[in-house]
Structure formats: structure tokens, C-alpha cells
Amino acid sequence: MRHRSGFCCFVGRPNAGKSTLTNALVGSKIVITSDKPQTTRRAVRGIVNRPDAQLVIVDTPGLHRPRTLLGERLNDVVRSTLADVDVIGFCVPADQKVGPGDRFIAAELPALRKPVVAIVTKTDAASREQLAAQLVAVSQLGEFAEIVPVSATSGEQLDLLADLLVAQLPEGPPLYPGDVATDEDVEARVAELIREAALDGVRDELPHSIAVTVEEMQPREALTVVYATVHLERRSQKGIVIGPKGARLKQIGIRARTGIEQLLGRRVHLDLHVAVEADWQRDPKKLDRLGF
Ligand SMILES: Nc1nc2c(ncn2[C@@H]2O[C@H](COP(=O)(O)OP(=O)(O)OP(=O)(O)O)[C@@H](O)[C@H]2O)c(=O)[nH]1
Ligand SMILES: [Mg+2]
């Protein structure tokens, strides 16, 4: 059998389960996930290495109707990624009715002239009847090379999905060394782990207002000291994130540190600061500075 290699992009509305699916297929935690919409803000590559193929999955932000400049830039990230891949995985959750958000994306796909595999995600969260109805509803959204129901959390049908995606790749040698799971740099992953911890337990507009930057990572004896900043949009949000006597910020630090220690394979001291960057989601200069 000839070796295949190439790129697949997961698209879908916010919260469809794209990032969880990326991690499940790659087999390690490459990207952060949360129950808040618009968790992913960058295109991140996760690499599936097999003897017969190398499948590079590009996880993208959820495509949505933007309300801020950040939202517009996130959609641009998705559209520019879509132009460069071999196959598209269109994710629709099994446990929620097909809606305008899914139709909006489905309508954009034919113009790309690429094979699209429709992926019905979160099958573990839906009843048999719900799933059967969803497969029919999704089949009516467009022309798909395949329609496959999967669960990233139970692992159901993930091998089949990988086979179907690989079948759409051109023949070719591996594009990345066989032992890496992502080409994302360590500081960016550390910043994301901190943001994931900060997202836990906050509501409404606050999740969208959080951005994290890593200022410095310094080895110090057996430790790595990480200096990072949690950026918010309003002074009033500071109290919520820091919490009474700093209790919430401390929890964020503890939770993030666990993930960072796993990533680095070393003990970590995390030094977290909270700063206000007024309305950064709408300010082009601040967005540039924060890396969007
Ligand atoms: N039950 C169940 N929940 C899932 C599954 N996959 C994802 N989820 C949950 O769905 C929520 C959203 O998951 P994400 O992977 O962050 O979704 P996303 O599509 O990447 O979201 P954005 O980055 O915001 O576009 C999280 O709470 C996940 O735990 C699944 O297979 N089964
Ligand atoms: Mg995501």
C-alpha cells in the first residue's frame, strides 16, 4: 500500500466538538476544550501518525456570525485554513437540532470544491432515535463524500473516521517527523492551558474577554518558572477572576499548573498576573499585540 499524507480541517459551529475530536484522534491533548462557545481562537495542527499515512488535522475556531473584530478575525482564520486542506470534516453535534449556524457553514462548502466528510459528533449524548434523525438532517445539508457518526469521549467510530479521512488524502511521504503530535510551540500551548483553567466556572461574556500571554519561561534548578498574564476587558471582571482574597486565581493557577507540568515533564512554578486591556476584542492594535 502506498503511503498517504495531507491536511484535514475540522469546521463547525462553536461547541460542535471539533477540538475534543482533534485530541481524541491525535491521542494526546493538543488543544484546549470547554463547554463555552468560541474556545478555539487559532488554527492548530494535530498530527495523526500511522504506518500507512500521516493525517494532519487543523482544528479551527467555530465559524459564527461575528459580533466583534476578534470574531471576524476568527472566521478569517477558518476560511484561510479551508483553502489549503485536502479534505474537510464538517462537524455537527448529534445532540442538538441542525440550525441556521450549521446551514450557514454548509452553504459555504461547495464553493471550496473539496471532499467533505460530514461528522455527526457526540453520539454518546444522543438517543438512537435522535441520532437516526440527525443523520437524515445532516444528509440534507449538502453533498458529502461520507457521513459518519462518532463520539470523541467514548471513542466510538474514531478508527473508521480516521480511515475515511485518510482515504481522501493524496499519496505522499510524511510531512512532519513521525514522533511529533503538533507543531505548536510550547509557550503557546502553556498560554492555552492557562486560558482553559481560567474558562472553567466563568459565565456570560467573561469567557470571550479572557486572553492569556506567556511573558517568560525560565528553568530554575528542578523547576520551570512561568510568568504569564491573564488579560481581561473591564476592571469589573478583575474581581471575578481573582476572587475573594485571590481564591479563584489560585484555583486557576493550580489547575493550569497540573496541565503544564504534564506538558513539560517538569515541575512548574506559575506566576500569574491579571491585567485589563480595555475592549481588546474590538481594538485592532490590541488584537495584533495579543496575537490575533
Ligand atoms: N458527550 C460528549 N461531549 C463532547 C464530545 N465532544 C465534545 N464534547 C463536549 O462539547 C463541548 C465543546 O467541545 P469542544 O471540543 O471545545 O468544541 P469546539 O467545537 O472545539 O468548540 P469551539 O472551539 O468553541 O468552536 C465540551 O464541553 C466537550 O466536553 C463527545 O464526543 N461527547
Ligand atoms: Mg475548539
Image (tube, rainbow, N blue to C red):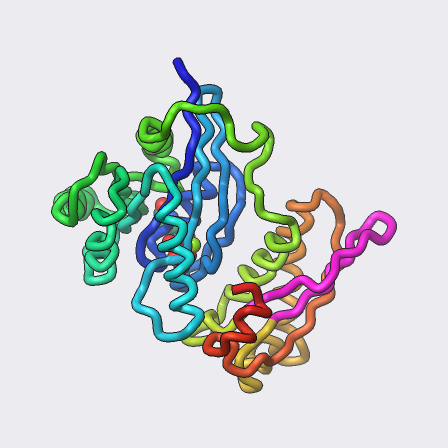
Q: Name the residue at 61% across, 59% down.
A: 191
Q: Would residue 177 appear left or right of 70 to someone viewing this image?
A: right
Q: Which residues are magenta?
A: 211-230
Q: Name the residue at 65% across, 49% down.
A: 186
Against 195, is 267 above or below? above
Q: Residue 42: horizontal and vertical position, in percent?
A: 48, 56
Residue extending farthest bottom: 236
Q: Name the residue at 36% across, 30% down.
A: 169
Residue 225 image-quadrant placement:
bottom right
Our reading of the magenta stretch's main secondary structure is strand
Residue extending farthest top: 1
Q: Would residue 175 appear left or right of 130 to someone viewing this image?
A: right
Against 210, is 259 above or below? above
Q: Name the residue at 20% across, 54% down.
A: 107
Viewer-proximal residue among 55 and 224 = 55
In the rendered image, residue 213 lying in the magenta stretch gets the answer yes
Q: Residue 137: horizontal and vertical position, in percent?
A: 14, 48
Q: Quadrant of the N terminus?
A: top left
Q: Residue 118: horizontal and vertical position, in percent?
A: 25, 42
Residue 87 image-quadrant placement:
top left
Q: Would residue 79 appear left or right of 257 to someone viewing this image?
A: left
In the rendered image, residue 57 lying in the magenta stretch gets the answer no
Viewer-proximal residue among 41 and 286 = 286
Q: Residue 76: horizontal and vertical position, in percent?
A: 39, 60
Tally of numbered discs = 0
Against 247, is 81 above or below? above
